[in-house]
Amino acid sequence: MPRPRLTILSLSVIHRDSRVLRQIDFAARRYDITVVGWGHLDRERPHVTMRPVQRVILPPPQRALQAARMLGGRLTPRAFEQWYWAKPDHHQALQAVIASQPDLIHANEAIGLPIAIEAARQTGAKVLFDAHEYSPDHRANSLWWRILAQPLYTHLIHRYAPQADAMITVEAHIARRYEKELGRPVGVIRNIPSYQALPFRPVDPHRIRLIHHGTAIRERRLEIMIDALARLDARFTLDFMLRSKGDGYLEELQALAQSRAPDRIHFRETVPPAEIARTIHAYDIGIHLLPPVNYSYEMTLPNKFFEFIMAGLAVAIGPSPAMAAIVEKYGLGVIAPDFAPETLARMINALSLEAIEIMKQRSLEAAKELNAEQEMAKLLALYDDILAT
């Protein structure tokens, strides 16, 4: 019996996109997969073909025209459609998806959704819309984003999401908000790495190692964690493992770390997504203090949080509801009552060696339940349900 054809569409850098790579890994067990997106695959896999899309940077006159179209969309939705289909990479992606002759299109994030819907119209494929986070409020703390991009993403979601055969997101609060706005059911598939049976690693009482990893994004205010480390006892150190966006923010963080806590904060090279949990296993506490400057940040439930748990680390966070619920359920970390660096620092300073080691052991136990095998089983069942209708 031929394997169903699944096209995974994501206008992201595929080899660095943990969620998309996870979809590929698990779906390839049962589907012939075509991946459409930027970059390349992180490695070859049986039953997986990549159709790369060239990311196009328009020259200044065309960018100005595109900005005018985005502004015009506030008056007429037609301008948003003109903006969308004037981008050459969107046309490339559409042709690549159509050429793959899919039975099912898994469209990641709102920016790829019109492509998936149009390709489905031309091929008869089904569409799963994976919204990831809450797109209309993703960078609502930025005035320019609110003026230009927020109305666009709101339009894309409200016009195209109702046309998808099914819809998922990464977190239950976000799913309920989408359901209320769109009047349709929205499932939840969380961002969790594959299970790895890592051993318990005792804590060195003289060098308790904290880690934070991800992308150096200014809106995330990573300098707060530098401030927190500077308030910790000398037994604590902090490593950052950050991808740069090329905007100078990473360099600013490095300079601040040198001035606030010289020799106690270090910046190390990043590793591929599949190697993160094993790499950070050498640490003791995963720290993530993310002020809720927008709704997606407020309800964040990111890869890194589950990678901390998979690596067997204690977790130190602010009062982010989705993460806090898991920390409380499994007893694997500390939750500050606010996002002030001095508050979290005070709580970490108060931890005994025994308390940290108990939290680390609880993370290793929680990882047996919180893993991609559990989440991806739900995704593959959803694929089957969509294709059966």
Image (cartoon, rainbow, N blue to C red):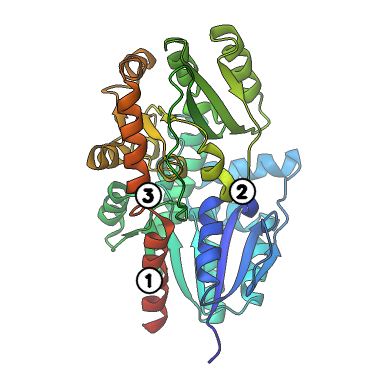
Residue 326 is drawn in which quadrant? top left
* Mark toward the viewer: 3 or 1: 3
Residue 363 is drawn in which quadrant? top left
* Mark toward the viewer: 3 or 2: 3
Q: Could you tell me residue 202's position as x and y percent?
A: 43, 32
Q: Are marks 3 and 1 in contact (CB under 8 Å)?
A: no
Cα–Cα gap, marks 3 and 1: 23 Å
**Which residue is at a point 35% across and 17% down the rendered structure image?**
340
Of all residues, the one furthest to the top in this rendering is: 259
Q: Is residue 315 left or right of residue 106?
A: left
**How crowded is the residue under tag 1: few (<14 C-alpha within 10 Å), some, or many (20+)?**
some
**Amino acid type, residue under disc 1 in the picture:** Leu
In the picture, the disc for residue 382 is: 1
Q: Could you tell me residue 203's position as x and y percent?
A: 43, 27
Q: Could you tell me residue 228's position as x and y percent?
A: 43, 16
Residue 15 showing in the rendered view: yes
Among the two numbered marks 3 and 1 on one chain, the one whose residue lies closer to the N terminus: 3
Residue 175's place in the image compared with 9, above or below, is above
In the picture, the disc for residue 16 is: 2
